[in-house]
């Protein structure tokens, strides 16, 4: 190898090494710059993340402050709802207890009403109470359980009317069918029981018509009142026997509930009052004449009393004048001379009021 070639070779190697070193250094500096850029980005990212975290905490606190009243109200509502639920459950328990007791009482009443004697007493008491509310008085305007024909006829009530007439009322109503309807488990059984109730009521109408109160009791009207102590008894029967009322009227039997019987007996009470006024009209006229005569005598005495009062006032005033002109001057003079330590005589005022003359109204032509 020639020297020139060797020189050229060495120069090329030196240039290649220098170029390699430069490239390696450039790469190293690039890596450092990249690392610094990444570190700066990471630092900025951390700052941004911290900013976001702080902002999120602040917003979260603000939201919590905003939501806290709602949370407290919701808690109060939950507590009130729980209290209402506890109260509702307690009230429901009380209602159940009341319903249980009511059912027991209803069963007791239904059992009692199955007794013929109890049903009769219920009707009689309701009948008497209705008559009393209408203004009638027992033993005066009506009689109860008064027998006739040796006790074979004994209506529950006989209402006395002016003129010696009477209204006969019967309150012995069959209730077996109606009580079965109240205890029925379904509509079919209830309907069958109510139809049976209507049949029982129709039979009772026949029994009342057969007793012939109208012809066998003196003064009785030509009809008998069949009293039902509750309006539902008649309504239930007529619902399943629409011709029941017409059938009873043809038999001279009139259905009456407490409402309709009250109206009938109220009219009877008014009739008694009008009859009493008619009976007492002559006596009232006589008392009015006696009262007029006594008023005339009283007016005469009253007029003379007024005249006597006027004379008394005139005499009083004359005595007062003598007292003032004769007695008072002498009394004052005695006191002026020191002969008396008694109190001075009082001053007396005259009476200037005279009794008013009675007015005599002019008689109209």
Image: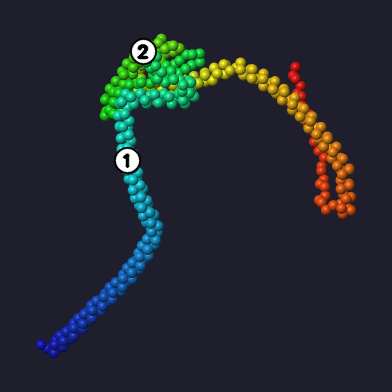
Residue 144 x %, y %: 42, 21
Give the residue drawn at x 69%, y 22%. 294
Give the residue drawn at x 83%, y 35%. 315
Q: Which mark is residue 297?
A: none
Residue 149 x %, y %: 38, 12
Q: Is residue 48 above or below residue 253?
A: below
Residue 282 x %, y %: 61, 16
Reading the image, the residue beneath label 1 is 97
Q: Quadrant of residue 303?
A: top right
Quarter of the image for the C terminus: give it. Answer: top right
Q: Is residue 166 above or below residue 129?
A: above
Q: Secondary structure at mark 2?
A: helix
Reading the image, the residue beneath label 2 is 211
Q: Is residue 99 above or below residue 15?
A: above
Residue closest to the eye, 131 or 285: 285
Q: Residue furthest bottom?
A: 3
Left or right: 342 as drawn, with respect to 60: right
- Distance CA(mark 2)–CA(mark 1): 48 Å
């Amino acid at each position: 190898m020639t020297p020139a070639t060797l020189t050229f070779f060495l120069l090329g190697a030196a240039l290649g090494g220098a170029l390699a070193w430069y490239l390696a250094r450039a790469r190293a500096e690039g890596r450092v710059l990249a690392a610094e850029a990444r570190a700066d980005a990471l630092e900025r990212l951390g700052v941004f993340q911290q900013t976001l975290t702080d902002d999120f905490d602040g917003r979260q606190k603000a939201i919590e402050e905003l939501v806290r009243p709602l949370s407290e109200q919701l808690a109060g509502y939950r507590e009130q709802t729980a209290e209402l639920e506890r109260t509702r459950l307690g009230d429901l328990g009380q209602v159940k207890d009341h319903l249980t007791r009511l059912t027991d009482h209803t069963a007791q009443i239904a059992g009692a009403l199955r007794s013929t004697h109890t049903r009769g007493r219920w009707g009689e008491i309701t009948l008497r109470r209705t008559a009393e509310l209408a203004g009638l008085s027992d033993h005066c305007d009506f009689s109860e359980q008064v027998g006739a024909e040796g006790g074979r006829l004994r209506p529950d009530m006989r209402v006395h009317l002016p003129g010696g007439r009477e209204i006969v009322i019967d309150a012995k109503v069959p209730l077996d069918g109606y009580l079965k309807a109240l205890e029925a488990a379904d509509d079919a059984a209830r309907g069958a029981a109510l139809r049976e109730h209507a049949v029982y009521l129709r039979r009772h109408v026949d029994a009342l018509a057969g007793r012939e109160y109208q012809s066998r009791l003196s003064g009785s009207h030509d009809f008998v009142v069949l009293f039902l102590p509750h309006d539902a008894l008649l309504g239930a029967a007529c619902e399943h026997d629409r011709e029941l009322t017409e059938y009873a009227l043809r038999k001279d039997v009139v259905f009456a509930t407490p409402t309709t019987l009250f109206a009938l007996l109220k009219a009877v009470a008014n009739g008694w009052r009008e009859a009493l006024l008619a009976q007492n009209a002559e006596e009232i006229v006589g008392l009015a004449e006696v009262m007029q005569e006594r008023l005339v005598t009283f007016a005469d005495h009253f007029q003379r009393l007024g005249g006597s009062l006027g004379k008394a006032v005139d005499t009083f005033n004359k005595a007062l004048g003598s007292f003032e002109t004769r007695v008072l001057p002498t009394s004052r003079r005695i006191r002026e001379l020191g002969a008396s330590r008694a109190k001075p005589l009082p001053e007396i005022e005259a009476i200037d009021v005279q009794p008013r003359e009675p007015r005599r109204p002019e008689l109209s032509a």
